[in-house]
């Protein structure tokens, strides 16, 4: 038998509402600029020809309700409230009409971002990894099965910091729908159970500081919470 040099990290898991089984996370895809008002506040135009993506390590998953240290290397750590899609069936080159069959469920999530490093990378046309692939930055609440969520559209997506509302939109404001995103990603990847898609954030992103309490909600989903801890 092959010996391993050290214990391989286990895949992070996400609880499922109303189920004893947990959902193991393998890959995290994130969508950029998927709400027009957020693209405008970032000083960029929405590309309506195709969505674009970046990825984060599955090891950045952080369960809701934790206190996590303010990350190193940044002076502008931002929240981004997002609808997260969990893939439950293999999907490769699926049409928009077929795409929702591959969706297992949904969760609220935070795509926490070192904005200063992301913008510096963007200005130099470099990859965003230092800004986005931040340890503990993919915060997620328990999953709700798709059948229990219903059609996507009228639900409100909101985020508050210390009780003050900062983001407030509707899922109908998504530029690329969940079905369109799953179909498009499946042109490039063999999507598999364990793949999460963070679908982008509405307008109102902003910085947090140690001690701040973030609460994100989407109607009919479990809320996502994060307390920003002291830097290490
Ligand atoms: Mn995001």
Image (cartoon, grey):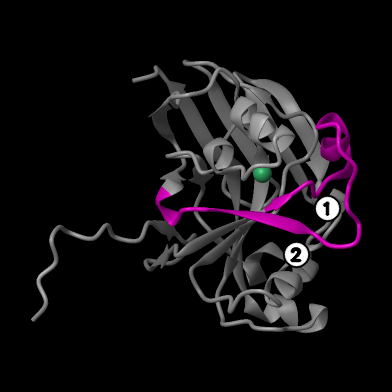
Which quarter of the image is occupied by the N terminus?
bottom left
Q: Position of residue 15 (x, y in %)?
A: 43, 58
3 displayed left or right of 67:
left
Query: Which residue was labeled with disc 2?
Result: 178
Q: Are marks 2 and 1 in contact (CB under 8 Å)?
A: yes
The crowding category of the residue bearing disc 1, from other C-alpha atoms within 10 Å (few below 14, some 14 to 19, many at least 20), is many
The crowding category of the residue bearing disc 2, from other C-alpha atoms within 10 Å (few below 14, some 14 to 19, many at least 20), is many
Magenta residue check for 182: no
Q: Residue at x 90, y 42 (%)?
A: 45
Q: Position of residue 73 (x, y in %)?
A: 47, 24
The magenta span reads 31-59
Image disc number at residue 174: 1
Closest to the observer, 194 or 216:
194
Image height of 95 relative to 117, above or below? below
Q: Position of residue 212 (x, y in %)?
A: 53, 18
Q: Specify the quadrant of the image occupied by residue 148.
A: bottom right
């Amino acid at each position: 038998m092959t010996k391993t040099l050290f214990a391989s990290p286990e895949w992070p898991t996400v609880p499922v509402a109303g189920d004893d089984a947990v959902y193991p996370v393998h890959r995290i895809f994130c969508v950029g600029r998927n709400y027009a008002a957020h693209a405008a506040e970032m000083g960029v135009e929405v590309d309506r020809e195709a969505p674009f993506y970046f990825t984060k390590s599955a090891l950045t998953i952080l369960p809701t309700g934790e206190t996590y240290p303010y990350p190193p290397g940044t002076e502008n750590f931002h929240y981004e409230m997002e609808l997260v899609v969990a893939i439950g069936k293999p999907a490769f080159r699926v049409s928009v009409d077929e795409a929702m069959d591959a969706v297992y469920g949904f969760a609220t999530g935070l795509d926490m971002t070192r904005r200063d490093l992301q913008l510096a990378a963007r200005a130099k046309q470099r990859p965003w990894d230092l800004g986005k692939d931040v340890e503990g930055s993919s915060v997620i609440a328990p999953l709700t099965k798709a059948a229990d969520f219903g059609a996507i559209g009228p639900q409100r997506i909101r985020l508050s910091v210390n009780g003050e509302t900062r983001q407030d939109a509707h899922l109908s404001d998504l530029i690329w729908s969940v079905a369109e995103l799953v179909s498009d990603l499946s042109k490039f990847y063999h999507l598999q159970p364990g793949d999460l898609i963070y679908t982008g954030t509405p307008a109102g992103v902003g910085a947090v500081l140690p001690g701040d309490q973030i609460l994100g909600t989407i109607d009919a989903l479990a809320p996502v919470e994060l307390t920003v801890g002291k830097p290490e």
